[in-house]
Image: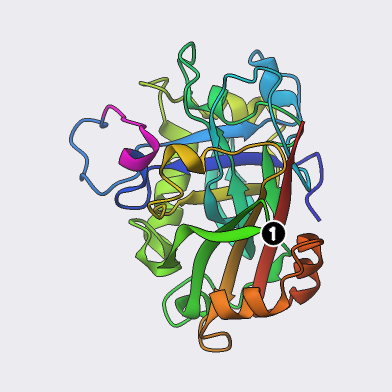
């Protein structure tokens, strides 16, 4: 269970091709490799902070649209990690993943007033969603996540479409030890730069939390997911699935076989150690 005392972060631009599809372009940190994620952004800060919208707990069963009906939203299928955090003085010494889950980082695409990425991320109490939480054996090669894929489906007017490409989670640009080292560095050293906040003061303001929830990046969309038709509408349903492809080789067939269009939330009864599944209705 995700509680309100957790600090939530997301990794920006960690999967080839997603940022371009989403219309998000970032200034690169000087002297870094082009495949490196562009930054780490907060989507929820549990204690009072100057950017007060980030104090709104935004993890919810449903996607709750913002009040401004002109804003365009896309779901973002991701893997999220629950991590234990160790400190050395006021610096983060290590982050240790203990669990993972399917995650939806629904984001606004056309908020022209936004100067920071986080402003597009926490737009209501139903901005984010998490699937059932699965314990990790280890977060390294030859661990269970080697066999996991991530995908996303969309239902509108009784028709299900594939929304996110079926992607191996190990094809994130940064994953396993490389990702963890990068996260520690960003928590300690990320400056206020481009559309990203300095993070050390946020960690300090949050009371040096011992646990964090970190969404590691959105994968690519299908043609439908990246189209104008793919922007979310009231009444839509979004299904994000992280699954063991050895145990469930045909995920689309598996979902279609178990889907009840009149009650898509019933799919969540499929949750197990082989599948983290998240079903969210789009509401106002």
* 258 and 141: which is toward the camera: 258
Tell me the residue that label 1 is attached to.
278
Residue 197, relative to residue 112: is it above or below?
below
The main secondary structure of the magenta stretch is loop
When asked about the image quadrant of residue 46, the answer is top right
* 203 and 214: which is toward the camera: 214
Q: Neighbour class for label 1 at 10 Å: few (<14), some, many (≥20)? A: many
| Quadrant (top left/top right/bottom left/bottom right) for the N terminus | bottom right
Residue 50, relative to residue 213: is it above or below?
above
Please state the total of marks drawn on the protein image.
1
> Which residue occupies the extreme left position in the image?
31
Q: Is residue 271 magenta?
A: no
Q: Residue at x 79, y 61 (%)?
A: 265
Report the colour scheme. rainbow
Locate residue 161, reporting x and y percent: 53, 60
Q: Is residue 25 magenta?
A: yes
Locate residue 95, reporting x and y percent: 56, 54
Residue 125, relative to residue 237: is it above or below?
above
Q: Residue at x 81, y 39 (%)?
A: 4
Q: Residue at x 45, y 78 (%)?
A: 146
Locate residue 170, reporting x and y percent: 40, 68
Position of 54 with respect to 146 (left or right) is: right
* 11 and 141: which is toward the camera: 11
Q: Which residues are magenta?
A: 20-27
| Quadrant (top left/top right/bottom left/bottom right) for the C terminus | top right
Residue 86 in sight here: no
Locate residue 80, reporting x and y percent: 59, 55
Q: Secondary structure at mark 1?
A: strand
Residue 39, relative to residue 113: is it above or below?
below
């Amino acid at each position: 269970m995700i509680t309100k005392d957790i600090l939530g972060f997301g990794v920006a631009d960690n999967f080839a091709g997603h940022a371009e599809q989403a219309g998000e372009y970032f200034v690169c940190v000087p002297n870094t490799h082009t495949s490196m994620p562009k930054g780490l952004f907060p989507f929820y800060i549990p204690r009072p902070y100057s950017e007060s919208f980030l104090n709104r707990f935004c993890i919810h069963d449903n996607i709750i649209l913002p009040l401004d009906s002109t804003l365009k939203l896309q779901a973002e299928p991701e893997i999220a990690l629950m991590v234990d955090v160790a400190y050395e003085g006021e610096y983060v010494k290590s982050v240790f993943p203990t669990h993972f889950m399917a995650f939806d980082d629904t984001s606004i695409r056309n908020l022209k007033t936004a100067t920071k990425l986080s402003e597009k991320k926490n737009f209501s109490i139903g901005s984010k969603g998490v699937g059932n939480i699965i314990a990790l054996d280890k977060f390294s090669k030859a661990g269970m996540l080697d066999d996991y894929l991530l995908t996303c489906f969309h239902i509108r007017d009784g028709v299900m479409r594939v929304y996110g490409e079926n992607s191996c989670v190990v094809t994130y640009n940064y994953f396993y030890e490389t990702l963890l080292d990068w996260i520690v560095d960003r928590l300690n050293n990320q400056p206020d730069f481009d559309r990203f906040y300095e993070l050390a003061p946020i960690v300090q303001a949050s009371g040096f939390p011992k646990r964090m929830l970190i969404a590691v990046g959105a994968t690519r969309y299908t043609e439908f997911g990246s189209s104008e038709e793919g922007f979310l509408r009231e009444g839509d349903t979004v299904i994000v699935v992280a699954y063991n492809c050895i145990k469930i080789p045909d995920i689309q067939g598996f979902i279609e076989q178990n889907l009840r269009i009149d009650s898509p939330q019933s799919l969540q009864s499929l949750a197990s150690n082989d599948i983290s599944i998240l079903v969210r209705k789009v509401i106002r």
